[in-house]
Amino acid sequence: MQSVDRAISILEILSQRQEAGVSEVAVEIGVHKSTAFRLLGALESRGLVEQAEDRGKYRLSFGMVRLAGGVAARLDLTQQSRPVCRRLAEEIGETVNIAVLRSHYAVNLDQVRGPSAVTTQNWIGQLTPLHATSSGKVLLAHLDDRHRARLLDAAGFERYTPGTITSLPALEEQLDEARRRGYAVTVEEYEAGLNAVAAPVRSHDGEVVAAVSASGPAYRLGEERLHALAPVLVAGARDISHRLGHTG
């Protein structure tokens, strides 16, 4: 743990100073010069730092961009989707969420409550099951067969309500429908009394990178209303996709 802490401190030092030599780093983190040299070597071997030409100093390398890329992509998705989600929440009147894949779950990155939403449930950061949520179904539907099978094998088919889909054939049928219709629905499958509809969000290269969903109480968002609202949500998902650079 001490080595990890020191390595992180070195990255912070280089971020602040742009460049620093072994002796400077050693003094800054309070270690012998040989220890600082060894830590810098380890970071260099992983492409996180590099030596500046002919100056005996180190600086951050482009490996840091690779690590930051995942976070930057999520931040960009949240930033670009927020105005559209606000509009959708106002138009639909219910809670609107943006979700992405994380391991074998769907995780919600952002949430906007509509004027009709009465629940105080905060879904941001929540890991939700792929097979029992509308966002999860959308994300699963657009994976290749091998990737989808691997995630479902890890996740299983836990039953949350009497309406939860607990078999692969039944789920595959709904995923086929989601691809054909351009959206997916859940009717009291994750929580009793909660229904939702979701549509795919695509990146600049056409890959499905997220799902935008609208959810609300079953007495207000019955199955018929879910399908009636679907075109609004699909159009919103298309707007977010365009904001991410998708031209299709």
Image (spheres, rainbow, N blue to C red):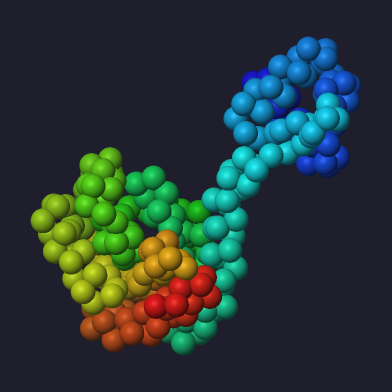
Q: Is residue 156 above or below residue 195?
A: above
Q: Is residue 117 visible?
A: no
Q: Tell me residue 241's x, y (percent).
A: 46, 73
x 76%, y 14%: residue: 35
x 29%, y 80%: residue: 226
x 60%, y 30%: residue: 46
Q: Is 149 in front, or is 57?
A: 57
Q: Tell me residue 123's x, y (percent).
A: 47, 60
Please identify the quarter of the rendering in which residue 248 is found.
Answer: bottom left
Q: Is residue 88 left or right of residue 105?
A: right
Q: Is residue 170 left or right of residue 158?
A: left
Q: Is residue 1 above or below residue 94?
A: above
**View extreme (left): residue:** 169
Q: Is residue 131 visible?
A: yes
- Looking at the rendering, in which quadrant would you find the N terminus? top right
* Number of marks present in the image shown: 0
x 23%, y 83%: residue: 224
Q: Is residue 144 left or right of residue 72?
A: left
**View extreme (front): residue:** 54
Q: Tell me residue 39's x, y (percent).
A: 71, 21
Please identify the quarter of the rendering in which residue 49 is found.
Answer: top right
Q: Is residue 245 left or right of residue 229?
A: right
Q: Tell me residue 110's x, y (percent).
A: 53, 64
